[in-house]
């Protein structure tokens, strides 16, 4: 076998659309550049809003193929020629291709597959016939990777439970954040909203997973008691559906479905509380970024990284039932699809400066561990 290039690392992405996993990979790539590595980014498609987010020092390689599976052959060729110390993917399709490339390239390059969501939730969403094979391929091929990177303890436990993959194959490494850059960007922008209103912020794709319907319904209860506004940053397939709900409830002057932005940090800096009503998550980038800026957090206890972030010293398998609120160490947990208690939690945060200030300081302390330099060190231990 040929000796690998210990100062070159590679990443493979399907596209550059604004998903959390893609952003994590681009942050990792930048972190390795800062650490002195040569970094290659292999792309199936160069389309997407994150293209401008790529660090200019990263070498972009357009695979120029018509189907994802066809990426296998140019990736094998690339690995044999460049011999990176490791190559990492973050979606199930990318990961399957990378593992096959490892098998057929006969090199020492390590293949790291990142998993950002529990398999239990992921497999539920495979409704198309062509996707039914994916869970089988994951269970069959993932053990041939060099390491499976879970972004939370809960994701790691779920991988083992659902796929029967050995615990030794799985490593928990949190998502990396450039804290100083986030703080700097939070000061850049113009506020076009009413400064006299309390601002509730939500960030994420307008899809079923994020359950913005429940958030809008909760906000409808909040705004009847507090002079407030709701800003949702994101785009997606549910935009028209959500716009209709906003109109029907007469909230057009109080709920703003803004587009995806490269700089959500400015909005986080200028809001009063961040609310996540997700039905499922891996380990939310948005919650970590909001926490870095000291924004108090209310989030659904959706059986994944949310409890791990906000209540790390509790039973991570616990999940709130509807009708309950839990004021935990670093934020507030509510049950999924519970508009009444979500509204109660928001009102309590907005009306009680002492609680808001306490959670602001606590979550900043908690999120300091996600500094990119610390995370890069964890990855380097794998090769």
Image (spheres, helix red, strand yellow):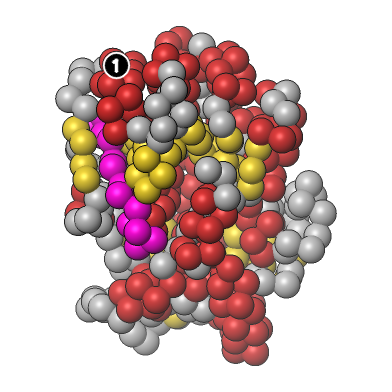
Where is residue 166 shown, x and y percent of the image?
73, 29
Dividing the picture into quadrants, the one containing residue 250 is bottom left
**Residue depicted at 37% across the width and 40% down the height:** 5
The N terminus, quarter of image: top left
Find numbered disc 1 in the image and state the secondary structure of the residue it sits on. Answer: helix
Judge whether 70 appears above or below 267 on screen.
above
**Residue depicted at 52% across the width and 78% down the height:** 294
**Outermost residue, bottom direction?**
354
Q: Dot 1, how many residues are within 10 Å of its Cα: few (below 14), some (14-19), or many (20+)?
A: some
Report the span colored magenta.
Answer: 33-45
**Residue depicted at 67% across the width and 64% down the height:** 310
Q: Is residue 105 rendered to the left or right of residue 38? A: right
Where is residue 361 shown, x and y percent of the image?
60, 83
Q: Nearer the viewer, residue 372 or 259?
A: 372
> Does the segment drawn in magenta span residue 36?
yes
Where is residue 180 shown, x and y percent of the image?
39, 76
Q: Is residue 45 rendered to the left or right of residue 89? A: left
Q: Which residue is under mark 1?
A: 73
Observer able to see residue 85 = yes
Q: Nearer the viewer, residue 232 or 36?
A: 36
Judge whether 127 appears above or below 148 on screen.
above
Observer able to see residue 275 = no
**Residue depicted at 48% across the width and 65% down the height:** 373
> Does the segment drawn in magenta span residue 220?
no
Dividing the picture into quadrants, the one containing residue 367 is bottom right
Q: Nearer the viewer, residue 314 or 202?
A: 314
Where is residue 226 shown, x and y percent of the image?
51, 79
Q: Nearer the viewer, residue 305 or 331?
A: 305
Q: Is residue 317 rendered to the left or right of residue 66? A: right
């Amino acid at each position: 076998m040929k000796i690998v290039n210990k100062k070159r690392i590679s990443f493979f992405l399907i596209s550059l659309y604004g998903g959390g996993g893609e952003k994590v990979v681009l942050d990792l790539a930048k972190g390795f550049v800062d650490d002195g590595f040569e970094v290659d980014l292999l792309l199936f498609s160069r389309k997407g809003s994150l293209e401008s987010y790529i660090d200019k020092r990263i070498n972009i390689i357009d695979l120029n193929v018509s189907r994802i599976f066809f990426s296998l052959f140019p990736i094998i060729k690339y690995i044999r020629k460049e011999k990176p110390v490791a190559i990492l993917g973050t979606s199930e399709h990318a990961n399957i291709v990378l593992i096959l490339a490892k098998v057929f390239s006969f090199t020492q390059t390590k293949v790291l597959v990142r998993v950002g969501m529990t398999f239990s939730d992921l497999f539920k969403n495979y409704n198309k016939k062509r996707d039914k094979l994916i869970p089988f391929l994951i269970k069959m091929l993932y053990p041939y990777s060099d390491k499976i990177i879970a972004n939370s303890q809960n994701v790691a436990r779920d991988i083992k439970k659902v796929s029967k993959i050995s615990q030794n194959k799985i490593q928990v490494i949190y998502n990396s954040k450039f804290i100083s850059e986030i703080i700097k960007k939070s000061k850049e922008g113009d506020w076009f909203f009413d400064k006299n209103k309390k601002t509730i912020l939500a960030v994420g794709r307008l899809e079923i997973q994020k359950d913005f319907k429940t958030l809008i319904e909760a906000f409808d209860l909040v705004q009847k008691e507090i002079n407030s506004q709701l800003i949702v940053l994101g785009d997606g397939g549910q935009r028209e559906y959500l716009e209709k709900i906003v109109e029907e409830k007469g909230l057009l002057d109080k709920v703003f479905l803004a587009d995806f932005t490269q700089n959500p940090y400015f909005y986080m800096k200028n809001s009063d509380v961040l609310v996540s009503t997700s039905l499922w998550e891996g380990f939310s980038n948005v919650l970590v970024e909001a926490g870095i800026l000291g924004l108090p957090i209310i989030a659904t206890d959706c059986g994944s990284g949310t409890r791990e972030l906000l209540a790390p010293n509790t039973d991570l398998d616990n999940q709130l039932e509807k009708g309950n609120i839990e004021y935990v160490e670093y934020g507030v947990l509510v049950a999924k699809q519970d508009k009444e208690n979500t509204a109660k939690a928001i009102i309590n945060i907005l009306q009680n400066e002492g609680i808001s200030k306490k959670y602001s300081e606590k979550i900043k302390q908690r999120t300091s561990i996600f500094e990119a330099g610390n995370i890069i060190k964890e990855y380097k231990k794998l090769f």
